[in-house]
Image (cartoon, grey):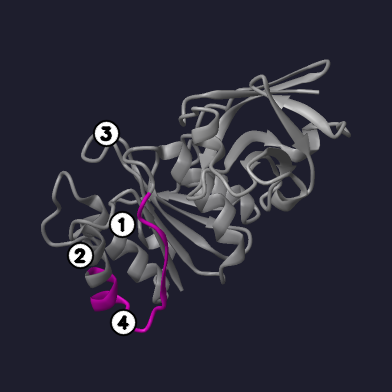
Amino acid sequence: MISFTTDYGLSDGFVAACHGVLARLAPTARVIDITHLIPPGDVRRGAAVLAQTAPSLPVGVHLAVVDPGVGTARRAVALSTRDGSILVGPDNGLLLPAAEALGGVAVAVHLTNAEWFAPKVSATFHGRDIFAPVAARLATGSSLREAGPEIADLLSLPPSYVEQAPGRLTAAIQTIDHFGNVQLAAPAELLPPLPESVRVNGVPAVHATTFGDAEPDSLVVFADSAGFVAVAVNGGNAAARLALTAESRVTIMY
C-alpha cells in the first residue's frame, strides 16, 4: 500500500505524473489517495490531515508532498515508524505528526541515493523525480538504509497556539474541512466539563456530542473524531458563520 497526499490540486497533471512513476516502479502496489487539495504550501494542514488519516490505513508507505521549499537546501527524507510503516517526503515538519501517530520514528534517513531517483531530477518537481521513485522502491521491499545515511535532527513544526484561562480556551485552527467544520489545535481533553451554553468568539453555541444535538443552523462545540475540540454549525458552515480563515484563532468562553 502506498498512500499519497499533496497540495498539487486536481486541475493539472502533477498527480497523474506521480501515479505514473508509482505504476511503473511498483505496479502491484495499491495506491490510496488521501487528498491532493491541501491548500498550496500549507505544511501544517498537510501534516494534520496525514496524521489523522494514516492510522486508519494498512501498514505501508505514506508518500506526502507539501513542499514550498522544493529545490532548496531542505532535505528529502524517509522515516520508518514503530508500527512498520514508512513515510517519504520533505524534511519540513510534514511527516513527523503522522510518524508520532504511528508509534514514533524508528529510523530516519536523508535521501541521497541518486540511483533511486529519476534519471533527470527537476528542481521544482521532487514529488515525481525523488519522492515517488523512492516510495515505490520502498513499497517493493528495498531497504530504507539503502536510501541514504541515517539522521536524527528532523525538522518539526512550531507548536500551535493553545491557551487556557479560567472560563476560556483560545486555540489556533488546525483544519477547516469540506463542510466548514473547524478543528482547533486543542485536544478535546483540555476542555473541562462544560455547561450546555457556551460562546464561540462571542457567538452563542451549545456544547454537545454531535451536530444534531444543536438546533438547525446553530453553533455546536464538540470533540471531533480525531480527538480535538471542534466547532460546527448544524446544517451549515461554521468557518463562514464566524468569518474564520486558517490563520484565525478561536476563543470558547464557558
| Residue at image point 63% right, 59% down | 82
Secondary structure under tag 1 reads helix
Q: The residue under label 1 is which amino acid type? A: Phe
Label 3 to label 1: alpha-carbon separation: 16 Å
Query: Mark 3 packing: few (<14 Cα in 10 Å), some, or many (20+)?
Result: few
Nearer the viewer's eye, disc 3 or disc 2?
2
Label 1 to label 2: alpha-carbon separation: 12 Å
Secondary structure under tag 4 reads loop
> Disc number at residue 27?
4
On screen, residue 121 versus residue 156, left or right, reads: left
Q: The residue under label 2 is which amino acid type? A: Ala
| Residue at image point 63% right, 25% down | 171
Q: Determine which residue is flagged by label 3.
A: 73
Residue 162 picture location, percent across and down: 66, 24
User: Between 179 and 2, which is closer to the camera in this rendering?
Assistant: 179
Residue 157 picture location, percent across and down: 50, 32
Q: The residue under label 3 is which amino acid type? A: Ala
Q: Where does the magenta region start and end?
A: 21-37
Residue 237 picture location, percent across and down: 53, 42
| Residue at image point 50% right, 29% down | 244
Nearer the viewer's eye, disc 3 or disc 1?
1
Q: Determine which residue is flagged by label 1.
A: 131
Please say if the residues under marks 4 and 2 sit with CB atoms less than 8 Å apart.
no
**Which numbered disc, 3 or 1, marks the residue that appears first in the sequence?**
3
Q: Is residue 25 magenta?
A: yes
Query: Mark 4 packing: few (<14 Cα in 10 Å), some, or many (20+)?
Result: few
Secondary structure under tag 3 reads loop
